[in-house]
Image: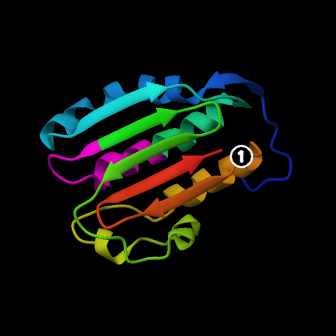
Amino acid sequence: KLESPDIELKKEKCDLVEILNSLTDKYSPALSDKNITLSVTGSFIKNVDKKLITQALENILTNAVKYCNENGTITINGTNKHLSIANSIDKPITSKPDKLWEPFVKDDSSRTNKNGSGLGLSIVKNILDYNKMKGRITTTETSFEITIQ
């Protein structure tokens, strides 16, 4: 559906941090099981298709919870310029960050004991593109971060 040229966006002013905050209750059991500390601060207001952007944010949050290490942290921070969703990891990412936006790409270090098709971030990128936003992935030895502008 996202690749259809006939897609119609219903844009409205939304706080993306507020949307993420409303989604966090769903992840409480997983956060508790892995003893993950979640921090949500700030706001990031954009004119977007709320239904689509909620799907994108849910994909990002699902990945953050899934790939965050035990006793780790997930930090969501909005400013007037960008939104950042970062999670701690226990294994460095071996793939080039830009490759992770492509369909069916999963990092080698994430394959063990993890389910998923490798489509989540590709869907996120399409939704960001439709909403005329940019996403950037950055990684370090101990963190994975998606920044949306």
In the picture provided, is 111 more to the left or to the right than 128?
left
Q: Which colour scheme is used?
A: rainbow
Residue drawn at (77%, 28%), measured in percent from left and top?
11
Query: Relative to residue 13, is residue 148 depicted above or below?
Result: below
Residue drawn at (32%, 42%), measured in percent from left and top?
74
Q: Label 1 is placed on what type of residue?
A: Met
Tell me if residue 145 can be seen.
yes
Where's residue 1, x and y in %? Answer: 70, 50
Residue drawn at (48%, 72%), measured in percent from left and top?
105
Q: Which residue lies furthest to the right in this view?
A: 6
Q: How many marks?
A: 1
Where's residue 119, x and y in %? Answer: 51, 61
Magenta segment range? 60-73
Where's residue 149, x and y in %? Answer: 66, 44
Where's residue 16, x and y in %? Answer: 57, 30
Q: Residues within 10 Å of mark 1 (few under 14, many from 20)?
A: some
Depth check: give the residue in front, 89 or 30.
Answer: 89
* Residue 125 is one of the magenta-drawn residues: no
Q: SS at mark 1?
A: loop
Depth check: give the residue in front, 97 or 130.
Answer: 97
Tell me if residue 1 can be seen.
no
In the picture provided, is 111 more to the left or to the right than 14?
left
Depth check: give the residue in front, 31 or 44.
Answer: 44
Q: In which quarter of the image is residue 56?
A: top right
Judging by the rendered image, the residue that carries numbered circle 1 is 133
Q: In which quarter of the image is residue 122?
A: bottom right
In the picture provided, is 44 more to the left or to the right than 1?
left
